[in-house]
Amino acid sequence: MAHIMIAYIFWLVGGWWGLHHFYLGRDRQAFIWWATFGGCFGLGWFRDLWRIPEYIFAANRDVGYLNEFEQKRTYYPCPTFNVVRFIGEIILGLTFGLLTRLCVPEENAYEGIGWLFCIIVPPCAIALGVHVVANVQPTKASFQWPLIGALCGVPWILYDTGNLVYSAILSAVFVNWKGKQWNPVVGNSRPFCKRFFSLFFCCLLYSTLWGVVIYQTASITTKDGEEVPLREAIPNFFNSPAWAEMKESLKELYKFYQVHGFEKLWEEFVEKLDPTGETNAYKVLNLTDTATEKEIKVRYKVLVKEWHPDKQRDPNKKAEAQEKFMEIQKAYEILSKIQTRRMRQNVKDRRKEEDQEWMDRRKYRKDEF
């Protein structure tokens, strides 16, 4: 038996994550609130302020509520159009579609299985999101109609793989036009453990999707202003001295914080992560970070000759030499790109300084006259 005071406490404490909906047996709605940050950034959470009493009647199978529900089903053979639910279907469907689309970087969108993820999978994800919202009590819907509607938006996706709005709208239109029925089952009679683990699995799957998207699209900015994709920075981090010497690195960061404070700590932390792979590249070539371009080239040539697989007579060492050879080449490429980029930046900075000096001299001469 659900109690209204407990429901409002859950609404206040964990309403943004759908805790009150889970308490009332509305698991789908709890997942929607959790996935959209309180029902579209708190709008649904605020709306629940005056909707909770109705949810209480449904959860407790109140006689008055059930009689009213039966009268509504008799008067309206199909559920009436609901603007709020329609918008919710579009929002969750579009969210699912965009997440699956962003799992594939733009440069890999048309290579192999990437095409499948960009053209076919997003409409299916959109249909799933629309289907979840359409099945919130007291209505139910089949998966067929939202899927047909989402697939009707494929021509716009073929023109632009990021244009998923039309698929989301058409999917919501189709499910409201043909797919909805009344759900005669009021409340939730499933065991608590089954409900909890089902919801936990859905939330875990959704969180994993977000993790993949962040891994594929996020980037880290170094102190030089270079943006390094997170998918490149993470492998570099696991090869960095900071990872190999984690305990020592944490001590150094703490000492740095004591001297410079929080403002500079993040920049130093990013440098310790070695997102560009520069520190590890110097380590592979056995050089310091003060090495010149000439020293890097000389050291590279020496190591390439030493570790070339064709020069290894022992068959057991060829695999090790091949791996080391590739590591040396990669390290040299990283340092070469960094050196070239810094040289270009220095030239740009020098030109800016010269232009500024020329403007200052010109202004000074005008002031004299």
Image (spheres, rainbow, N blue to C red):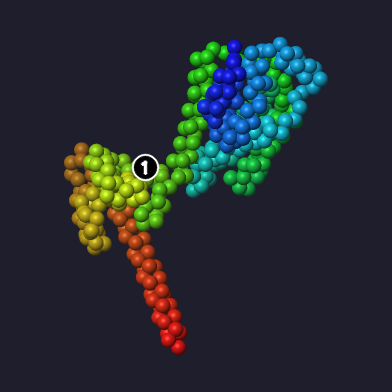
The residue lying furthest to the right in this view is 75
Tell me the residue at 75%/16% (across/down): 68
The residue lying furthest to the front in this view is 5
Observer able to see residue 325: no
**Front-most of residues 67 and 131:** 67
**Front-most of residues 130 and 263:** 263
Count of number-bearing discs: 1
Residue 102 drawn at (x, y percent) = 52, 41
Q: Is residue 258 left or right of residue 114?
A: left
Picture quadrant where residue 74 is located: top right
The residue carrying mark 1 is 234
The crowd level at tag 1 (other Cα within 10 Å; few <14, some 14-19, many 20+) is: some
Q: Is residue 321 left or right of residue 204?
A: left
Tell me the residue at 51%/19% (across/down): 196
Q: Is residue 277 above or below residue 175?
A: below
Q: Is residue 114 left or right of residue 168?
A: left
Residue 273 drawn at (x, y percent) = 32, 45
Tell me the residue at 69%/33% (across/down): 84
Q: Amino acid at mark 1?
A: Ile
Residue 345 drawn at (x, y percent) = 37, 64
Determine whether the residue tagged by mark 1 lies in a helix, strand or loop.
helix
Q: Is residue 224 above or below residue 61?
A: below
Q: Is residue 160 left or right of residue 230?
A: right
User: Which quadrant, please, contains the C terminus?
Assistant: bottom left
Tell me the residue at 72%/22% (across/down): 181
Q: Is residue 219 above or below residue 50?
A: below
User: Which quadrant, please, contains the N terminus?
Assistant: top right
